[in-house]
Image: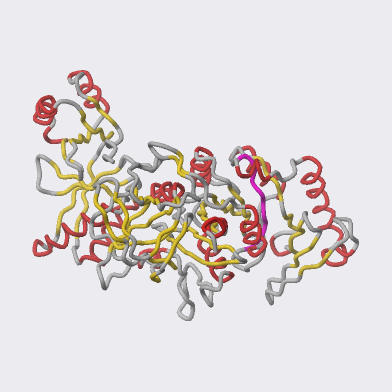
Amino acid sequence: MSLDSEISKRRTFAIVSHPDAGKTTLTEKFLWYGKVIREAGHVRAKANRSYTVSDWMKIEQQRGISVSSSVLNFPFEGCYFNLVDTPGHQDFCEDTYRALTAVDAALVLIDSVNGVERQTIKLMDVCRMRKTPIITFINKMDLDGRDVLELLDEIESVLQIQTSPFTLPIGYGKAFKGVYCIADNTFHTFNKEDGKQEILQMSSADDPKLIELCGEEYVKEFKNRYDVATQAMEPFDREKYLAGKQCPIFFGSAVNNFGVRQLLNTFADIAPPPVPRESNIRLIEPTESKFSAFVFKIQANMDPKHRDRTAFLRICSGSFERGNKVLHCRTGREIRLAAPTSFLAQDKEVIDKAYAGDIVGINDPGLFNIGDTLTEGEKFKFSGIPDFAPEFFARVTLLNPLKSKQLSKGLAQLSEEGATQLFSALSSALPVIGVVGELQFDVLKHRLEAEYGAEVQLDKIPVFGIRWILGEQKSQETFSKEYRGDCMHDKNGNLVCLFPNEYRLNLAVKNYADLEFNNLSPASPL
């Protein structure tokens, strides 16, 4: 098969939502349709049930939340999907934001009971900034939720995107009867008791069979929504969808596997194949013959028995075969991609070939940083891979001094994943870690103990703001002597100051006019 046709089959997308909207449950149903799992797990598994495939970390299974982006590859209806299941909790937002740089489309999941929630708004802002095409699935229609037209209006006003309903529900909560598909005039029946679903052809939304099946009261309510959707709302326009200005809307119940297949079918039909990517020298087209990719995530200990590290690559152009040599642009080194893998969360399978749009894993011996570019020889760097300044800080005290090697290794490896940043203080031997969300402290502490055997105490440091200090070496040295108690070095040796209050920051800026005080770390060299 030609390169162009292989690339055109790829669909690379992320699922984003507020916590508890049903994201991980929906992901499991997708995998079931892709025939890569036999039984979709539940988020909090009972004794006789499987855990969810995508929430593979111990802490995720214990708490019933996703704390790290999980990559899943599966085929469906002639397409090949690369799905990134992202954390919904705001304390893990930087992992989600990076994942959004690696995808071409997004599925926004909304809880019909709670409507548009705070974290969904934040994630939508990122999608809008990147002009990412989105499809919306309104979940939990089998619960007593908000009015459908009210939900559609809220999506348009709060998320600032035009809606185009592909399906509309008849009834909701205990009286949920099913969904009506506007495009082909079919009614998809919902039966919570036995899970059986039928697809019934209707002549139109006025077909009297709907009243026989659902009751006059519910059909009347549905007809009101239908008239608004077909007469007052803009019809679906794929160009607007691809530009991130309009989103198709689906209704269903992920836990009951209802409305999921329709959603997946539409994603296969209308979601974009791999799109061109900006670099610091030119636009890189996916169908270019030469391979290029970037690292958007690093994960340590996916298999704790082997203490492995995996770098996640988004392939942006061309294809590559197992064993090919590529250029690591930042270091200028030629490296061999010996055993690229596809994923089902932590389960890996070595693959022989991959194409633009695919997300693959490669073994990381400590060489890769987030944002690194790999090419077939040309030297450039892909743009738009964000680096986030931490907002919360803590000193790390090892409780068992005999485990110092394990602690050093654990902090180094976990900080390279990007969720935590490691600093070495000028005035103390204790390492300092910085995170974007406070819950990351719990994850770090748990993983240091569970994966490295290093039990630690974290003492939080009150910090108003972090600044990277740039300028002449002599001025930096003078500054660091005066502010020694607040100064440290980051992983690249850059001077950093953790200002305890606004007054101290303003005073430093005033007294050291020849220095730059940046709230983002300096870009890593090419």
Q: Is residue 52 left or right of residue 478?
A: right
Residue 288 versus residue 517 in the image, above or below: below
Percent x, y of residue 327: 30, 51
Outermost residue toward the bottom in this view: 48
Q: Is residue 429 left or right of residue 297?
A: left
Does the magenta-highlighted stretch encompass residue 170? no
State the residue at coordinates (45%, 51%): 317
Q: Is residue 519 left or right of residue 318?
A: left
Q: Quadrant of residue 427?
A: top left
State the residue at coordinates (26%, 58%): 445
State the residue at coordinates (89%, 56%): 206
Q: Quadrant of residue 307?
A: bottom left
Q: Nearer the viewer, residue 236 or 275?
A: 275
Q: Is residue 459 left or right of residue 418?
A: left
- Please report the bounds of the magenta region as a residue range: 245-253
Percent x, y of residue 74: 52, 66
Percent x, y of residue 333: 24, 51
